[in-house]
Image (cartoon, rainbow, N blue to C red):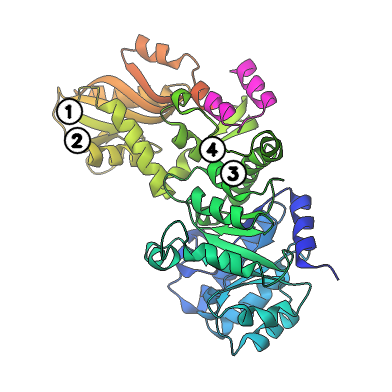
């Protein structure tokens, strides 16, 4: 009988992945394309369709699935039926970690029997406070495993977890204690944090243990730092969560694929770096780093910027693909992008901000709120009824408007929008975009009377990603040859 450790390693090797997906029927996270949680009679069916969609999108890209029991029990008897159905739908070669945080000593024996014998899950998460007695009934199954929670990310828990002092916190004592409960194949550690230093301290205390990371996705987190802190010297020993917002996206598989490749590019460097020097240094020297390095890395890690061979809307094939539409679903990244735009706009003179439909409308709205300037926008198509306005919003002829767009490829949408604004008596001098593809479009805009500004250029992104180890030599060379 194959044990959990071997099954997990087999899945990691098969799919070349350290990613884990949470299969949680959370009504509040249900994508609208699967329905709304308003009708109890259809809710279970809608959640079922969504979970099956997630499995279909990710089964070839992850190493494990992690259903949270609480979401299923909250749905009552139908929820438990749904759990059993989902467990059957998971491919047999992928291990299942049941997320329970079980803490009741009296029910441990019967609960272990239920989940390991009847439900056939491969591992379970446990609370540490009842001690080894809680884990003992689960460890009677030699082919199964337990993940003991040692640290969570919620701020209120820090009072307990970092007690009595930071150089000897309780969460590290828990790690040390659980190492005596069983072998590395049977006893692993669960760590919720977005701080590399916490993961690094756990790794230093338990270099041989598998770590299940969670809650790593938050503002300011650099995935490379999380990986370097949590991976062992062989570039393994860490399971990472797929972001929840990926699982609600219609292109969940595409986003997960990009994240897997990002992780793997860091993983392959870990063993050689460990042999060369036991001390970790940042990927990019601080003095040489691009001022938006963190933003570039996070966009890459979210799958907004990917490199490969991709057919564009124009029919051309580029060695990259950029899709910024998903950033509005990530408030932390979106806020950073608004801040980067604002730095450019603060150097310009204007009376109003105009967003180009539809991609730049959320950005223009954010900038209007951030900088306290009124917003307008040129309609993409003129209404055949009502006022038939060409430009929406209040304005006065003769005022100067700065145009905001997302990506500068051909410049067509920006020029058309600017011309609509000018036809109503407004002045347009500056067009600001987030990303310039550097196809000579800034010069084209200049010929038409507009000064173009960009937060980033594609070359800056490629060079930053290459310096950070996200792009291989071949990818970077191909970019330079075709760009």
Circle 1 sits on which residue? 351
Neighbourhood count class around disc 4 (C-alpha, 10 Å): few under 14, some 14–19, many 20 upward: many
Position of 139 compared to 168: left or right? right
Question: Distance of mark 3 from mark 1, alpha carbons?
Answer: 47 Å
Mark 2: secondary structure:
loop
Q: Disc 3 vs disc 1: Cβ atoms closer than 8 Å?
A: no
- Which residue is drawn at the image coordinates 46% and 41% (left, top)? 325
Mark toward the start of the polypeptide (1 vs 2): 1
Question: Distance of mark 1 from mark 4, alpha carbons?
Answer: 34 Å
Query: Any magenta on residue 479?
Result: yes
Q: Which residues are magenta?
A: 462-483
Position of 296 compared to 63: left or right? left
- State the image coordinates of residue 454 (x, y, percent, origin top left): 39, 23
- State the image coordinates of residue 55 (x, y, percent, origin top left): 66, 60
Residue 340: image quadrant is top left
Q: Is residue 320 visible?
A: yes
Circle 4 sits on which residue? 300
Q: Using the image as rendered, state which of residue 372 and residue 339 is in the foreground.
A: 339
Circle 2 sits on which residue? 373
Mark toward the start of the polypeptide (2 vs 3): 3
Q: Marks 2 and 4: which is nearer the front?
A: 4
Question: Distance of mark 2 from mark 4, alpha carbons?
Answer: 31 Å
- Which residue is drawn at the image coordinates 76% and 63% (left, top)? 5
Q: Disc 1 vs disc 2: Cβ atoms closer than 8 Å?
A: yes
Q: Marks 3 and 1: which is nearer the front?
A: 3
- State the image coordinates of residue 350 (x, y, percent, origin top left): 20, 25
Neighbourhood count class around disc 3 (C-alpha, 10 Å): few under 14, some 14–19, many 20 upward: many
Mark toward the start of the polypeptide (2 vs 4): 4
Q: Disc 2 vs disc 4: Cβ atoms closer than 8 Å?
A: no
Question: Distance of mark 2 from mark 3, alpha carbons?
Answer: 43 Å
Residue 335: image quadrant is top left
């Amino acid at each position: 009988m194959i044990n959990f450790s071997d099954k997990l390693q087999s899945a990691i090797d098969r799919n070349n992945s350290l990613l884990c997906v949470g299969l949680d029927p959370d009504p509040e996270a249900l994508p609208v394309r699967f329905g709304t949680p308003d009708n109890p009679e259809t809710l279970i069916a809608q959640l079922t369709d969504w979970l099956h969609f997630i499995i279909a999108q990710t089964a070839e890209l992850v190493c494990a699935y992690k259903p949270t029991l609480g979401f299923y029990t909250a749905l009552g008897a139908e929820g438990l039926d749904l759990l059993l159905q989902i467990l059957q739908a998971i491919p047999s070669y992928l291990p299942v970690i049941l997320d329970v945080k079980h803490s009741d000593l009296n029910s441990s024996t019967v609960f272990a029997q239920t989940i390991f014998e009847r439900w056939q899950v491969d591992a379970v998460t446990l609370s540490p406070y009842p001690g080894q007695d809680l884990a003992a009934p689960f460890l009677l199954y030699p082919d199964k495993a337990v993940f003991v929670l040692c640290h969570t990310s919620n701020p209120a828990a820090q009072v307990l977890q970092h007690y009595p002092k930071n150089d000897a916190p309780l969460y590290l004592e828990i790690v040390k204690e659980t190492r005596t409960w069983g072998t590395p194949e049977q006893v692993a550690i669960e760590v919720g944090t977005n701080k590399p230093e916490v993961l690094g301290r756990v790794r230093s205390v338990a270099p041989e243990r598998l770590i299940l990371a969670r809650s790593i996705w938050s503002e300011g987190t650099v995935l490379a730092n999380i990986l370097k802190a949590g991976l062992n010297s062989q570039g393994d020993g860490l399971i990472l969560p797929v972001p929840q917002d990926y699982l609600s996206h219609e292109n969940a598989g595409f986003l997960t694929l990009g994240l897997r490749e990002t992780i793997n590019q860091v993983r392959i460097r870990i063993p050689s770096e460990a042999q060369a020097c036991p001390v970790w240094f940042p990927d990019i020297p601080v003095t040489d780093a691009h001022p938006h390095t963190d933003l570039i890395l996070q966009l890459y890690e979210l799958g907004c910027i990917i490199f490969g061979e991709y057919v564009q809307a124009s029919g051309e094939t580029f060695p990259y693909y950029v899709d910024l539409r998903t950033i509005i679903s990530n408030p932390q990244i979106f806020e950073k992008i608004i801040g980067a735009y604002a730095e450019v706009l603060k150097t310009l003179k204007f009376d109003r901000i105009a967003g180009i439909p539809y991609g730049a409308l959320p950005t223009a709205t954010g900038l209007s709120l951030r900088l306290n300037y009124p917003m307008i926008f040129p309609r993409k198509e003129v209404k055949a009824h009502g006022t038939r306005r060409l430009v929406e919003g209040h304005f006065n002829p003769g005022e100067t408007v700065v145009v905001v767009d997302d990506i500068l490829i051909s410049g067509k949408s920006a020029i058309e929008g600017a011309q609509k604004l000018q036809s109503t008596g407004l002045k347009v001098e500056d067009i600001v975009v987030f990303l310039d593809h550097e196809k000579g479009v800034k010069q084209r805009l200049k010929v038409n009377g507009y000064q173009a500004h960009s937060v980033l250029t594609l070359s800056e992104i490629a060079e930053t990603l290459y310096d950070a180890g996200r792009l291989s030599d071949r990818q970077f060379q191909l970019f330079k040859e075709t760009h």
